[in-house]
Every structure is written in C-alpha cells, then in structure tokens.
Amino acid sequence: MEKIKDALVKAKQNTGNKSERKKEAPNTESLKSSHELVNENNLNAISYVKTKTIELNPNHLEKNRIVAYDKSEASTWIFDKLRTQVLQKMQENNWKSLAILSPTPASGKTFLAINLAISIASQPQKTVILIDFDLRKPRVAKYLGIEGSSSFNDYLENKANLEDVLVNPGIPRLVVLPTLKPVSHPAETLSSAKVNALIQDIAERYESRIVIYDLPPILNADDALIMMKKVDCILFVVGNGMVKETEIEEAMHYIPKDKLLGMVLNKAEVSAEEYYY
C-alpha cells in the first residue's frame, strides 16, 4: 500500500508549478478555453489552470483494480504492453480517438479504459482525455473515486462550462470528463449538436492528445453505434466466460472492419507468453 501512496504523491508533484503557453483565446463553451496550458514541445510542463485537480484514494483504486499508474505493481506490464500496441497502430493510421466497448455488460471495459488511459499518459509525448460516454451506466468517476464535483451532466444542462467539469486525477498529462449519473435519452444526447461540437473540439485541440471514450455495451443500446461513426478506431473488450460466441459474432457485425483496432480478452489469468491482443 505504501508503494501505491508513493506513486500517487510522485504523480501529483509532477503536475505542478510549470508554466506553458496558451494556444488560443478563451472560449467558455469549448476546449479552446484556458482550462490547461500546454506546450507541445514540453508535455512535462502542463499547467492546469481551471481544471480541477483531485487526490486519488489508494485504497479505492486498489479495490477497483486501477493499477497502471504504479509501475511497481506486477500487473502493470499488461497495460503497458497493450498501450504500446495501441499507440503503434494508431500512429500508423494517424488515429487520435479511440472507443472502448464490449458486446455485453460485465466485460470490464471501464476498468480497461481507465488503466489504458493512465498507461498512455505515462508516455512523455502523449496527453490523454478519458471521456465517460456510457451515459446509461457511467462508472469512470466511481472507479476513480471522483465525487462531489461538476460533471458532464452539468455541462449538458448548461449549468457549467466545459472547463468547470474536467478533472485532473493527480496524474500528469491525464484529464477526465466524468459523468456522475445516467442521462435521459442518451442516444439523442450523443447525436445532438452540442455533443458533436464537443467531440470535434476535443479531437482538434492538441496534436499530442489521445481521446478515449468509454462507451456502453454495443448489444444493449444504439448509443455505441452512434459514437462509432465519430471515432477513429475501436478497441473491443470481451470478458472471459462472460459472453456467448453468438453475442461476439453479433457485436462484430456492427463494428466497421476498417475501424477495429483490436480485441482484448479480459478477466483471464495469463502469463507474459499467453497474453495476446
């Protein structure tokens, strides 16, 4: 447990007191606002101006198996290896946005999305924004222990600007857009002009940024189908022993082959030689 606490303290210290240039004038309705100042030539110097920074609870993270920030954790290598494979494929195709989805619930997609986002953010030349677009059953905030703050719900209801709902979880180069409660009419929300503008803004903001969307299971609603058209690539997560073969085949029918980055078998006990993606 002390190793986890030390890792969090070190991550938090790396975020502070370094100035950077602002790329564009403030705009409170978009990511072009001064929520963070980024120098693309020195990503270790990110300064979170208006983005809320929180301190993660090591016990809560351990309970939810969020381990990728702690390089002393034995299972971290799995996410680092996946990160390398994902980034190589994305760079080859000039992809910037990645959707994480599963055929059915309980496959562990949110767990994987968070750990992958943290692992990518540990790369010195990458920044990451993790967006919880599972609007029917959002869990990113729950897994990280983000509570009592403004969220995507407030942004949708025009109660907060985007800069007010972004959160830096004390990890350098990582920003989270949490959704704290289910959203009414999620499919219609994801098709709205407000969300479309948000997606475009996020995609174009920084050259170094990887955008990760945690999406709902593809066979439970049409939300994921809507978002698949708006992302560059898709990582398909299958829970070992949790999904029928017919469900995998049906889900694959909906995923465009040119956007399928790969498939991850989750919840399997594997060795370094057995792990594959």
Image (cartoon, rainbow, N blue to C red):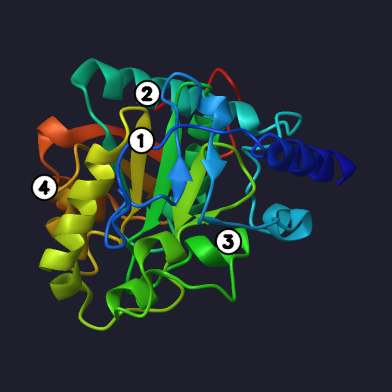
> How far, Cα to Cα, is label 3 from label 1?
21 Å
Q: Residue at x 46, y 28 (%)?
A: 82
Asked whether, in this view, residue 46 is left or right of residue 74, the answer is: left
Q: Is residue 195 left or right of residue 34?
A: left
Left of 35 or right of it: where is 13? right
Secondary element at image label 2: helix
Is there a contact, CB below 8 Å, between mark 2 and mark 1?
yes
Lower sequence index among marks 2 and 4 = 2
Q: Mark 4 or mark 3, which is nearer the start of the sequence? A: 3
Residue type beneath disc 4: His
Left or right: residue 125 versus residue 231 is right
Q: Quadrant of residue 75?
A: top right
Q: Position of residue 182 (x, y in %)?
A: 37, 79
Report the residue marked by disc 4. 253
Q: x, y percentage for residue 158?
A: 29, 78
Residue 143 numbered tag? 3
Give the alpha-carbon distance from disc 2 to disc 1, as whole Å: 9 Å
Does residue 241 appear in the picture of this structure? no
The quarter holding residue 186 reads: bottom left
The residue under label 2 is: 87
Camera-near label (3 vs 1) is 1
